[in-house]
C-alpha cells in the first residue's frame, strides 16, 4: 500500500542516489583509458619501460579495475626517445583512441613535446621520468603534472645535504648538454649558499667512450666531493672508471645527481660503493615500501626505480580523484588531486602544488659496500631526509598558474 511515508522514503533514496558520484558520473566514452608512453628498448628502458607499465597495471588492479562502474584500461606506447614520435603517439591517443591520461615519458625533450600536445588537446599528462624544471616553470600547463622529481630537487637536495655533512669542496664532471649544465648550475648555487666552494669542472661530450682524462682531472683537484652532473651512459662510466682509479680509496667521495637503483644494480656494489645520491624512493625504506616493492618484484624480477613507483602513486591518486569528482574532465580531476595530501608508500609529506608539481620529501643515501649488503638489492644506507620544500624550492614565478 502506497503511503506518505513510503513516498518520502523513495524520495530520500532517490536523493541519496543522485548525490553519489556514480549516479552523476560523466566519463567520456564510458571508460577511463591510461596510456603509458615510455622507452621500451632504449637507454631508459630498465628504469622505466615495462616496469612503468607494470606499475600502472598494478594500480588499476588494486583499484578494482573499474571506476564509477566503468572499466579502466592501460595501453602502451614506445616513443623511442624521439620527440616527434612521442608527440605523434600522444596526438593519436588523445584524438582517436580516447586516452584520458598519459603517464611516464622519460627524456625531458620528449616530455615537453607531449606536454605541448596535452595542452593543445586539453587532456591530462603526468610526467614521472621527465626532469626539466621548465616543465612546471615557464612551460607549465593546467593539464600536465610532474610527480617524482626535477633537476633542481636532485641537484639542490644532494648538494645541500652533502655540504651540511662536511662535503664543502666540489669538482664537477658535467655532461656537455643542457641537462648536465642545469644540474651543475643548481648544485653549485646551493654549495656556495651553504658555505662550500666549487673548485672546478670538466665537461665531457655525451657518450664519451674514454672518460679517463676527466676522472684524472677530478682526482687531481683534491676536492672532497666529485659531482657527477649527467645521466647515462656517461654517469655510469664515470663512476666505474673512478672506482678503477681508486678515487674512493684516495679519500674523495662521488655524488651522483641523477642515479637510479637499476644503475647501481648494473654497476655492482664493488664499483658503486660509497656513492652519494638523492632519490624520491627506496624499496627497503620501511614496511610500506617493502610490501609494494615485493609485489612488484614478483612480476618484474627487479626492484622498482623511483620513476616506476611514482607511476603507481599517481595513477592511484588520479583514479581516486575521478571517483570522488564523478568525472574524468581533466581540470576538475586535477583540482581534486590538489585538495588532499599525497601520502602513500611512495610519497612522504606530498602535496600537488598550484604549479602542478608534486612536492614531497627526498632521501640522501649512500651506496653500501659489498660487505655491508646482506641480501639482494640491499644497496642503500639512508643518511638523511630532505624536505620537499628545501629540495624543490618555491613555485617558479614564470609559471602562469602561480598566483602573483
Image (cartoon, rainbow, N blue to C red):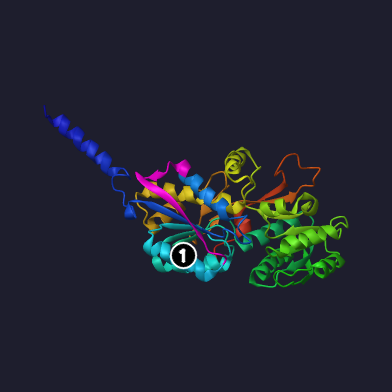
Nearest the eye: 366 or 81: 81
Q: Which percent across, then down, holds residue 220?
A: 87, 67
Q: Is residue 62 magenta?
A: yes
Q: Is residue 399 visible?
A: no
Q: Is residue 358 visible?
A: yes
Nearest the eye: 283 or 201: 283
Residue at the extreme front of the image, as rendered: 41
Relative placement, left or right, of 95 versus 343 is left
Q: Which percent across, then down, holds residue 274?
A: 79, 52
Relative placement, left or right, of 120 versus 220 is left
The quarter of the image holding the N terminus is: top left
Residue for badge 1: 89
Relative placement, left or right, of 312 versus 214 is left
Quadrant housing residue 240: bottom right
Tell me which segment is drawn in magenta: 61-81
Nearest the eye: 176 or 135: 176
Q: Is residue 68 magenta?
A: yes
Quadrant housing residue 377: top right
Q: Which percent across, then down, holds residue 134?
A: 56, 68
Q: Which percent across, then down, holds residue 97?
A: 39, 60
Which residue corresponds to the image point at 58% horizontal and 55% vertical from the top-left?
48
* Neighbourhood count class around disc 1 (C-alpha, 10 Å): few under 14, some 14–19, many 20 upward: some
Residue at the extreme top of the image, as rendered: 1
Amino acid at each position: 500500500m502506497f503511503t506518505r511515508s513510503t513516498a518520502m522514503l523513495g524520495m530520500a533514496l532517490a536523493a541519496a542516489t543522485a548525490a553519489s558520484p556514480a549516479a552523476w558520473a560523466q566519463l567520456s566514452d564510458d571508460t577511463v583509458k591510461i596510456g603509458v608512453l615510455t622507452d621500451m628498448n632504449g637507454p631508459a628502458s630498465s628504469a622505466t619501460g615495462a616496469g612503468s607499465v607494470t606499475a600502472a597495471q598494478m594500480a588499476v588492479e588494486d583499484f578494482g579495475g573499474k571506476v564509477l562502474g566503468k572499466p579502466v584500461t592501460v595501453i602502451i606506447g614506445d616513443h623511442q626517445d624521439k620527440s616527434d614520435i612521442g608527440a605523434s603517439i600522444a596526438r593519436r591517443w588523445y584524438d582517436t583512441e580516447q586516452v584520458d591520461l598519459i603517464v611516464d615519458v622519460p627524456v625531458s625533450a620528449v616530455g615537453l613535446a607531449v606536454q605541448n600536445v596535452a595542452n593543445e588537446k586539453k587532456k591530462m599528462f603526468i610526467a614521472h621520468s621527465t626532469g626539466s624544471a621548465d616543465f612546471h616553470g615557464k612551460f607549465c600547463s593546467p593539464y600536465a603534472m610532474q610527480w617524482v622529481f626535477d633537476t633542481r630537487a636532485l641537484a639542490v637536495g644532494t648538494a645541500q645535504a652533502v655540504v651540511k655533512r662536511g662535503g664543502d669542496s666540489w669538482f664537477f664532471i658535467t655532461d656537455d648538454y643542457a641537462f648536465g649544465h642545469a644540474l651543475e648550475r643548481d648544485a653549485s648555487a646551493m654549495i656556495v649558499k651553504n658555505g662550500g666552494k666549487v673548485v672546478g669542472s670538466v665537461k665531457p661530450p655525451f657518450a664519451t667512450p674514454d672518460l679517463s682524462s676527466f676522472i684524472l682531472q677530478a682526482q687531481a683537484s683534491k676536492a672532497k666531493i666529485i659531482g657527477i652532473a649527467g645521466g647515462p651512459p656517461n654517469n655510469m662510466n664515470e663512476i666505474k672508471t673512478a672506482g678503477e682509479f681508486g678515487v674512493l680509496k684516495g679519500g674523495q667521495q662521488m655524488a651522483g645527481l641523477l642515479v637510479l637503483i637499476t644503475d647501481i644494480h648494473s654497476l655492482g656494489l664493488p664499483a658503486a660503493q660509497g656513492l652519494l645520491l638523492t632519490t624520491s624512493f627506496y624499496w627497503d625504506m620501511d614496511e610500506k615500501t617493502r610490501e609494494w616493492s615485493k609485489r612488484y618484484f614478483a612480476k618484474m624480477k627487479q626492484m622498482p626505480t623511483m620513476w616506476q613507483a611514482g607511476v603507481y602513486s599517481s595513477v592511484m591518486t588520479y583514479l581516486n580523484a575521478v571517483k570522488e569528482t564523478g568525472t574524468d574532465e581533466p581540470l576538475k580531476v586535477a583540482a581534486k588531486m590538489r585538495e588532499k595530501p599525497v601520502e602513500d608508500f611512495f610519497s612522504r609529506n606530498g602535496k600537488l602544488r598550484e604549479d602542478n608539481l608534486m612536492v614531497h620529501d627526498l632521501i640522501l643515501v649512500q651506496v653500501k659496500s659489498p660487505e655491508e649488503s646482506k641480501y639482494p638489492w640491499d644497496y642503500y644506507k639512508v643518511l638523511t631526509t630532505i624536505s620537499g620544500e628545501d629540495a624543490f624550492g618555491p613555485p617558479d614565478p614564470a609559471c602562469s598558474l602561480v598566483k602573483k
